[in-house]
Amino acid sequence: MAGAAPLRVLIVDDSPDDAELTELALRDGGLAVEVRRAHGEAGVTGLLRDFRPQLVLSDVNLPGFSGAEAMAMARAALPGVPVVFLTGSSIGAPGETLPEGDGLLLKDDLDRLPDLLRGLLGR
């Protein structure tokens, strides 16, 4: 959307490569975005406070942290902020329940991410 303010997106992922691919998928899909990245609780806390994202994209599993925790923090700090989970596997680890946010997408399907977000945000 020409002239619209960029969408503030927080990407929570412990893999810099995956975070970069996610950002590229947004830009390649025609979304104007301002992106910040975090990989743990402290980074998420600071960015929720200072950056105030309009959307959170989070990996499901992070070392010492989880996407579910990131979602809880985001929803506490910014009620109503959409949270979309990205995962490398739709199965998850044995006994693991995948968190329910506003969307779940395999990292292999990032080309579908812009349309998913447009649907969520009405853009």
Image (tube, rainbow, N blue to C red):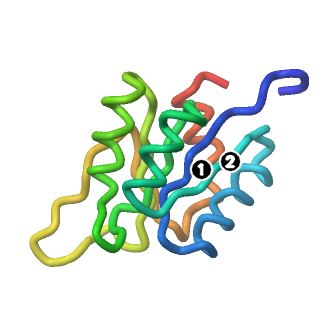
Amino acid type, residue under disc 2 in the picture: Val
Question: What distance separates the C-alpha of mark 2 from that of mark 1?
Answer: 15 Å
Residue 103 lies, in percent from the top left, at 41, 44
Residue 112 lies, in percent from the top left, at 60, 53
Q: Is residue 12 left or right of residue 67?
A: right
Residue 20 lies, in percent from the top left, at 68, 66
State the residue lying farthest toward the right. 2
Number of numbered discs overlaid on the protein picture: 2
Residue 78 in sight:
yes
Q: Residues within 10 Å of mark 1 (few under 14, many from 20)?
A: many
Give the camera-side residue of 48 and 105.
48
Q: Which image quarter is the N terminus in? A: top right
Give the mark, 2 or 1, whose residue is nearer the N terminus.
Answer: 2
The residue positioned 25% from the left and 51% from the top of the image is 99
Q: Quadrant of residue 16?
A: bottom right
Residue 53 in sight:
no
Q: Is residue 109 left or right of residue 28?
A: left
Q: Secondary structure at mark 1?
A: helix
Judged by depth in the image, the label closer to the viewer, 2 or 1, is 2
Q: Is residue 88 above or below residue 42?
A: below
Q: Which image quarter is the C terminus in? A: top right
Q: Which mark is residue 75?
A: none
The residue positioned 74% from the left and 60% from the top of the image is 24
Q: Which mark is residue 35?
A: 2
Q: Quadrant of residue 53?
A: top right
Q: Secondary structure at mark 2?
A: strand
State the residue lying farthest toward the left. 95
Amino acid type, residue under disc 1 in the picture: Leu
Q: Is residue 2 above or below residue 9?
A: above
> Residue under circle 1?
113
Q: Is residue 56 left or right of residue 89?
A: right
